[in-house]
Amino acid sequence: MAKQLLGKEVAAALNEKIKAQAEALKAKGVVPTLGIVRVGERPDDLSYERGATKRCDTLGVAVEKFVLPADVSQEELMKVIDKVNEDSSIHGVLIFRPLPSHLDEKAVIRALKPEKDVDGITDGSMVGVFAGTDQGFPPCTPQACMEILDHYGIDCTGKKAVVVGRSLVVGKPAAMMLIKKNATVTVCHTRTKDMPSVTREADILIVAAGRAGVVDGSYVAPGQVVIDVGINVNEEGKLCGDVKYDEAEPVVEAITPVPGGVGAVTTSVLVGHVVEAAARTLK
Ligand code: NAP
């Protein structure tokens, strides 16, 4: 039976560290604060906002919300972005996306200061990930994958890592982060030929394809660590990953469940970024 890599264990350990850092900052007179910019009332946004707010509360991070009507003008939204950029009491900013289609999302992202970009959406943050510097912040999901590897003591040095997916939000930054950890990395996508023969060679396999069950038992091999980033809803309406868990789990060494894997870590990573952004203002 494979070892289960449980997001809640990773999140619990991260939360302890974040809480201690937040307390240390408060002792120095800095209250780490997340600014949430939400346009409209999409149920997904509201649910994520509730989760993030609750996590911030329990970890000693303040939240300031900027809620705008769904028909807000570009000009009004840009004013809010300017405001959060200039407000030194707000250390990190989360902008819910996608924005309504009448808004220029790229312009909004370009306007956000990378030092406040705790969700890793700006070009500045991406430069930080690719250059291996601390400019901005990496996207929370690939960092959550790295936190899982670190928590369970999985050393990447000299290992073969395969990432399935090349999006800017998960696949590409995950590949860069694995390189920083001294892994030898291959990235697969829809044009990859004979993907099972590539993924079976991996010591560490990160799957972020966004297709339920695309990785079945023929894609995995004994000894592998599998991190399933996918969040999909199957025909029975249940959450499931990109990996066919029932087929992969008996074969591999360790695997994240869905739900209960990567998704359980991302909010803690986000809150950790807010605390780090606040700490950077003291440096
Ligand atoms: P995305 O933008 O749709 O990108 C998917 C990537 O996977 C693309 O690069 C695509 O290749 C590749 N791909 C799709 N089907 C494939 C196949 N059959 N074989 C090989 N490669 C394939 O998705 P994303 O935003 O990166 O998200 C990926 C998954 O992670 C989704 O299920 C999403 O819900 C989940 N997610 C989870 C969290 C979390 O907190 N756990 C956070 C964010 C996202 P091409 O480039 O060739 O099209």
Image (tube, rainbow, N blue to C red):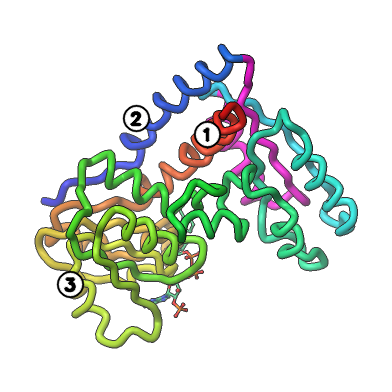
Query: Is 16 drawn above or below residue 207 in the view shown?
Result: above
Residue under numbered circle 1: 276
> Along the polypeptide, which appears first: circle 1 or circle 2?
2
The response on whether ligand 1 sits within 8 Å of label 3 is no
Alpha-carbon neighbours of circle 1 within 10 Å: few (<14), some, or many (≥20)?
many
For this orientation, the residue located farthest to the top is 27
Which amino acid, by three-letter code, is at mark 3? Answer: Arg
Name the residue rendered at 20%, 48% in the picture.
Answer: 155
Which amino acid, by three-letter code, is at mark 1? Answer: Glu
Alpha-carbon neighbours of circle 2 within 10 Å: few (<14), some, or many (≥20)?
few
Magenta stretch, residue numbers: 29-57
The numbered mark at residue 200 is 3
Quadrant of the image occupied by residue 203: bottom left
The numbered mark at residue 13 is 2
Image position, residue 188 (x, y; %) = 34, 76
Label 1 to label 3: alpha-carbon separation: 37 Å
Image position, residue 190 (x, y; %) = 40, 82
Q: How many marks?
A: 3
Q: Which type of secondary structure does the marked residue at label 2 adopt?
A: helix
Question: With 95 as the anchor, is 258 left or right in this view?
Answer: left
Question: With 271 as the anchor, is 217 left or right in this view?
Answer: left
Q: Is residue 55 magenta?
A: yes
Quadrant of the image occupied by residue 246: bottom left
Alpha-carbon neighbours of circle 3 within 10 Å: few (<14), some, or many (≥20)?
some
